[in-house]
Amino acid sequence: MTFAATVLTLYPEMFPGPLRLSLAGRALEEQRWSLETVQIRDFATDKHRTVDDTPAGGGAGMVLKADVLGAAVDHARRISPEAPVLAMTPRGEPITQARIRELVAGPGVTILCGRFEGFDERIFEGRDVEQVSLGDIVLSGGEPAALAILDACIRLLPGVMGAASSGTEESFEDGLLEYPQYTRPQEWEGRTIPEVLRSGDHAKVAAWRKSMAEADTRSRRPDLWERYSDARDRPASGAQEKD
């Protein structure tokens, strides 16, 4: 089944953009995924095709109108009734690799791209739209974030990556950052590949990689390390704690 992506945007010409290249581009040609862009402005009802208005209560910038957004989302749902709708906004829940895998397991995704000061809040009250963020940054619009979300999904589709393990032995898949990687030459500017990686002992290599992944996560991402430690120390499901 083809993974169907629908993007609601004021700038449909930004797609597929970089997704027409490399693995994603080849997968698009092979019809492993499909892309449809929807121009939000097409759902404006006035002669000027107005999609935004000034913020209620005053303030700088403009806000995307709920009536226009609602009509655009309704149209997207008719295209892909089963696909979840994600709105890209810095006020959203940070996306995770686990959520990406959930999306990949489904029929596709619809992504609503914001602009200006964001969305009229009533779109989230009146429609089933999931608010999603790439992280604690602010972009000029949701389109770059949508491209990132789609790329994260596409690379995990069956047959897109050459080696199946490429999608599992990497950062965030087991709650940790990925271990450090090395390749030839064996020595560069006086720095050598760690001896354990040249030992041929697969058990020792696996243990080293796990240790390094834990050490790097602990030092670089204490938030991830805390969640990983909590999950690791939690009793297995159904297990009874002893007094």
Image: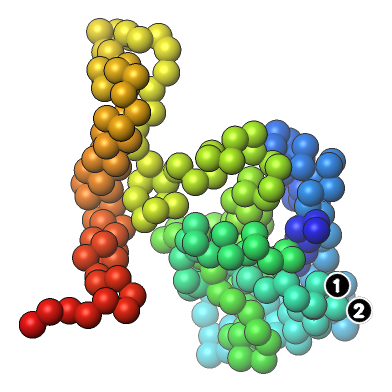
Quadrant (top left/top right/bottom left/bottom right) for the N terminus: bottom right
Mark 1 vs 2, N-terminal side:
2
Secondary structure under the numbered disc 1 in the rendered image: helix
Q: Out of 21 and 39, give the one closest to the viewer.
A: 21
Number of the label disc, if any, that sits on residue 79:
1
Image spot of residue 232 (x, y percent): 26, 62
Q: Label 2 belongs to which residue?
A: 47
Q: Out of 45 and 121, give the one closest to the viewer.
A: 121
Is residue 36 visible from the viewing direction of this image?
A: yes
With respect to residue 197, does 18 lie above or below? below
Q: What's the residue type where badge 1 is placed?
A: Ile
- Residue 64: image quadrant is bottom right
Image spot of residue 95 (x, y percent): 50, 63
Q: Out of 162 and 126, give the one closest to the viewer.
A: 162
Front tag of 1 and 2 = 1
Image spot of residue 120 (x, y percent): 62, 83
Residue under the point 35% across and 28% down = 202
Residue under the point 33% across and 75% down = 237
User: In the image, is 225 to the left or to the right of 148?
Assistant: left
Image spot of residue 128 (x, y percent): 65, 84
User: In the image, is 163 to the left or to the right of 79?
Assistant: left
Q: What's the residue type where badge 2 is placed?
A: Lys
Residue under the point 52% across and 80% down = 59
